[in-house]
Amino acid sequence: MEYRILIVGSGAREHAIARSISKTQIDHQLFCIASNKNPGIMNICDELILGDIENVDFIVENAIQKKCNLAIIGPENPLSKGVVDRLKENNIPSIGPTKDLAQIETSKSFARDLMKEYNIDGLPIYQSFTTMNGVKECLANHGENYVLKYDGLAGGKGVKVSGEHIFNHEEALDYCQGIISSNGKFVIEEKFIGEEFSLMSFSDGKTLKHMPVIQDHKRAYEGDEGPNTGGMGTYSDKDHSLPFLNKEDVKKAKETNEKIIRALYKKFGERYIGVLYGGFMVTEDGVKVIEYNARFGDPEAMNVLTLLETDLLTIFKSMVNGDLDSANVKFKNQATVCKYAVPIGYPTDPVKGSSVDVSMIADDEVISYGSVNTQNDKIILAGSRALCITELGDTIAEAELVVEKKISKVKGSLFHRTDIGKSELIDKKVERMNKIR
Ligand code: GLY
């Protein structure tokens, strides 16, 4: 059977997915619904269809027209709009959960309530609000350690952490009032102190196959300073754990992802087919859940897909067919580092429209293109994270050296974080964790 695959999204994550799929021996054609003319995806796909990647009608019409029999949904917004439900109605299976199940990412209160209802460990003290009634009292109870979460998708800008983004209760009340004034909902929860890590798992709704654990750096500037971004770079270690974690931490994260999938099945009677991304923090009281995402992380996808030894399309087939338990999902025992080159001024006031030159990088395979366009054979900055380089190594330090060498050769109005993956930064995390435990 020929697989006619539609990828929705055109960032680096979707480029990495397309690259992995293109390596399969299974007969296939690849289509991509894209918001930008991503040169990497254009090289791989049979057709790049430019358009609104959040327009469900447009996606479904194209999937039907191209006779697609599998869709892979990259970002969260189309999931929140029910694209998988609509594709399902048209007998097109997807990698990505339906709207109900995607609430694990799209509604912060849903995710917390699910954990509470099904007694899943790692839950903070939390309260959801649709009015300002009780907000002052709740903040007073939390003191100086709280997190405010807008209860919906906000492109990473909806979460405000005390001491990092919000510095007193007045600012907190202003933020909450702003949400209520626009008819929104929010959650106030306890702030955890520790180190973050993410664990993504392939899911067919019953069985999970876990991926290597990853560390993401969300802050824009060196030393984890500056505004939050989608992620400036990531690393993973040879043993599929991280230097500041122990075996119990990883086991706990795996069990938690498994419990979430079981809880979702019990609640909706429906299989979660897709990638479940658990964002965790290891604290003095063990592993806690920060948030869940209903998709591959970006840049995390670059790390895990570079390590993946098993054919990705075969894994996706098993997920759709519900026989992931019989799939042998294997990853290389190597470390990875991925770093993004982003436009100068990113994320607040990024340069757009100027060209990027990657001709000094001989190996195209290590580049994943993100927010760039192709114009007259030139690569043009489109305003968000432009491209990333991912490398393998026997150690994180070895992979980092190669990434640094290559990313420094990219010419354009760009910057990247030189510190991600360097021992100085990792050793600090290990020391900090040793003090916390
Ligand atoms: N890198 C974090 C995310 O994909 O949400």
Image (cartoon, rainbow, N blue to C red):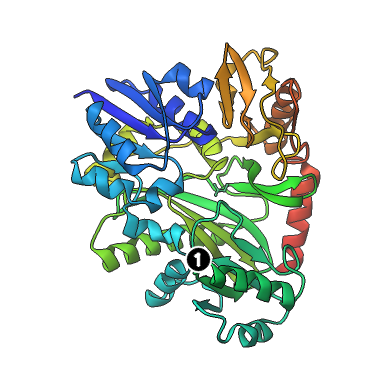
Q: How many numbered callouts?
A: 1
Quadrant of the drawing holding the C terminus: bottom right
- Looking at the picture, does residue 92 appear above or below residue 261? above
- 235 vs 201, left or right, is right
Tell me: 423 left or right of 228: right
Of 353 and 393, the residue lying toward us: 353
Which residue is more in the foreground, 282 or 229? 229
Residue at the (42%, 61%) spot, across then down: 104
Picture layout, residue 66 above or below residue 171? above
Check disc 1 and report its element: helix, strand or loop. Answer: loop
- Dividing the image into 4 quarters, which one contains the N terminus? top left
Residue situated furthest front in the rendering: 181
Q: Position of residue 353 (x, y in %)?
A: 66, 25
Q: Position of residue 188 (x, y in %)?
A: 58, 75
Mark 1 neighbour class, 10 Å CA radius: few under 14, some 14 to 19, many 20 or more: many
Q: Which residue is mark 1?
A: 151
From the viewer's perspective, is 3 left or right of 221? left
For the point 74% across and 23% down, the residue is 412
**For this view, does 354 lie left or right of residue 22?**
right
Mark 1: which amino acid?
Asp
Residue 98, horizontal then vertical, whole percent? 31, 53
**Residue nearest the viewer, comparing 134 with 388:** 134
Determine which quarter of the picture holds residue 168: bottom right
